[in-house]
Image: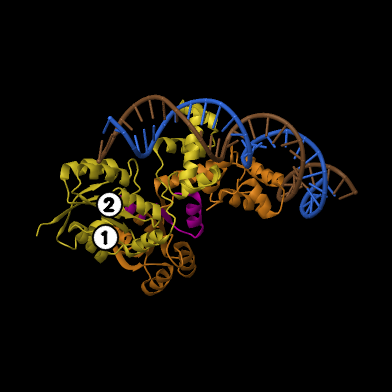
Chain colours: A yellow, B orange, C brown, D blue
Amino acid sequence: MNNIRLLLADDHPLIRAGFKSMLVKNERFEIVGEAENGTDLLTLTAELSPDMILTDISMPGMNGLEALQKVKKQYPAIKCIVLSMHEEREYIMNALKTGAEGYLLKSIEGPELEKAILVVFNGGKYFSPLITSILADSVARPELPEVGDITPREKEVLELVAQGKSTKQIADLLGISIRTVESHRINMLKKMKVNNTAELIRKAIEMKILS
Amino acid sequence: MNNIRLLLADDHPLIRAGFKSMLVKNERFEIVGEAENGTDLLTLTAELSPDMILTDISMPGMNGLEALQKVKKQYPAIKCIVLSMHEEREYIMNALKTGAEGYLLKSIEGPELEKAILVVFNGGKYFSPLITSILADSVARPELPEVGDITPREKEVLELVAQGKSTKQIADLLGISIRTVESHRINMLKKMKVNNTAELIRKAIEMKILS
DNA sequence: CCTGACATCCGGGTAAACCCTGAGCCGCGT
DNA sequence: ACGCGGCTCAGGGTTTACCCGGATGTCAGG
């Protein structure tokens, strides 16, 4: 059986070293490259055409999910497993939307990592047990907030709002009408199902839309 | 020259694996034990009496700093380096207060880690360059009028505001007038030197006044 | 004592946020 | 070709945020 050629992406050398030392124990795994950010991930994917990508979400510059989206578009055959420290539902949902075949927490241990890679390589999907239960919970919930689908323009407005800018200031900065800025803000209020701007900011930060 | 006997503490096997693989390259370093939490760290320290402890801060159960404090009390000779992902001033200050001889970010690379261990082992102190500059900044800048001087009542209002409650709702909940609630909010706007409620929320979260 | 500092409380007026409705333009995918 | 969705804008209305002021009470220090 052929080796499984893996591309590893994480901005921390420490984490990469950890994964490498977990993976070298199994001869079938071959780490063909390491990326420090989303951009590297894209170029290395093009150069190396790995069988599978293991990537962190939060990385400087282009983040893992953005990069993944582009990879999936160009090379749908490449399997992707997302590695993250975050147990928040939104993170997981976003990862799934980009087409990731697996989602693992960094609290993972060696044997589970191997299992996950093998399952995904053979066409399956794998999620940490904890992740599975989180997903199950959110399915059981009758109401699906379905939030997080903030458009680029909305995010632009959101960031200015968080900086304390008034609607008029934002309108001037973006060169658009006050009405338009209001539309964007109010659309976000509805999408996020919040009552006012204050809660919008809190929720946006909670969901890591804002830093 | 003798080996440096290290005790490693982190709740993620992945991180421990990363450190180990970074450290095995240097023969002088010997990892004599690994702890998954603060309690383990204490018992292993007693059993193994290592030369130095490398520990994460956030761990389930007893955290790294609590454990470090106890270790330092019982075995003052053991050097301690704190490993953390957090660049916040408070984290660093707390680590220093517990008597840690070093503070490293997990973005560290191998050579710097070796250097840090050697420096600390030889009686010195070591901090990531980034950490040093953060500390320097906070010393250099006398900092704004200690924005933490939010009064209990104000904080109460602040939390409700962050929950998306309107001034009227807050007034009813607290059993006071709308005007009073507004006063509290506006006083906070002035204290925090922000323009509106949206920015107030962002800043409050930034300063850990709100979760 | 009393004065200043501060937390808490309240009122009125203006600017802004909020909300509904409706609309045109454009890029994108089936 | 058509619909869908993002971005743009407007009228006109209600509600709220924002800021001006002033009022209590407490409490420490001169």
Asked whether B97 or B184 is in front, the reply is B184
Quadrant for the N terminus of chain B in the image: bottom left
> Where does residue A67 sit, x and y in percent of width and height?
28, 43
Query: Which residue position holds label 1?
Result: A126
Q: Residue at x 47, y 52 (%)?
A: B92
Q: Is residue B162 magenta?
A: no
In contact (CB < 8 Å): disc 2 and disc 1: no
Q: Can residue A113 be seen in this view?
A: yes
Q: Is residue A86 left or right of residue B73?
A: left
Asked whether B179 or B12 is in front, the reply is B179
Q: Which amino acid does label 1 sit on?
A: Tyr
Q: What residue type is labelled 2?
A: Ala
Label 1: how many Cα within 10 Å (few below 14, some 14–19, many 20+): many
Q: Does residue A62 sit above or below B33 in this rendering?
A: above
Q: Is residue B186 left or right of residue A143?
A: right
Q: Residue at x 22, y 62 (%)?
A: A114
Q: Badge 1 sits on which subunit? A: A
> Where does residue B46 sit, x and y in percent of width and height?
41, 73
Query: Which residue position holds label 2?
Result: A100
Asked whether A51 or B129 is in front, the reply is A51
Q: How far apart are marks 2 and 1 (CA)?
A: 10 Å
> Where does residue A32 sit, x and y in percent of width and height?
17, 50
Q: Quadrant of residue D18?
A: top right
Label 2: how many Cα within 10 Å (few below 14, some 14–19, many 20+): many
- Which circle's residue, 2 or 1, is located before the other in the chain? 2
> Where does residue D7 sit, x and y in percent of width and height?
41, 31
Asked whether B129 or A138 is in front, the reply is A138
Q: Is residue B84 visible?
A: no
